Amino acid sequence: MLTSLQIHEQQRGQEFYMKQSDLFDNKVYVEEICDVICIALAELPAVLNIQDVVETLLHVKHGPEIICGVVANSPDCFREGMPCSSI
């Protein structure tokens, strides 16, 4: 969520950019990040919006891979078209 807030603050008036992050920049953590995001989306649907999460992930190095992992683990969000239609 902190990364999301930082990205939204910096987006005002700027073009697309990549956010540096020790956690998201290491491919070793991609699977664990996918698991944590899937659990968070399932447990906190009122707090986390799949569209905001996907948009934020587009700004980190392995974001597309994480998005694929989230969609693979939560196929209902793919059927609803949420991430696909908003990107």
Image (cartoon, helix red, strand yellow):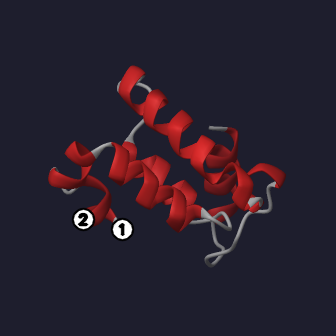
| Label placed on residue 8 | none
For mark 1, what is the residue? 87
| Quadrant including the C terminus | bottom left
55 sits to left or right of 12: left
Residue pictured at 58% horizontal, 48% vertical: 31
Q: Give percent across and percent down for residue 15.
A: 63, 79
For mark 2, what is the residue? 85
Choose between 86 and 61: the one closer to the eye: 61
| Amino acid identity at mark 1 | Ile
41 sits to left or right of 84: right
Count how many numbered circles sit on residues in the image: 2
Choose between 50 and 30: the one closer to the eye: 30
| Amino acid identity at mark 2 | Ser
Residue pictured at 40% horizontal, 20% vertical: 43
Res. 1 image quadrant: top right
Q: Give percent across and percent down for residue 55.
A: 48, 58
Labels 1 and 2 touching (C-beta < 8 A): yes
Mark 2 secondary-structure assignment: helix
Residue pictured at 68% horizontal, 68% vertical: 61
Task: Give the residue furthest to the right.
Answer: 22
Q: Give percent across and percent down for residue 7.
A: 66, 56
Q: Give above or below for 60 relative to 32.
A: below
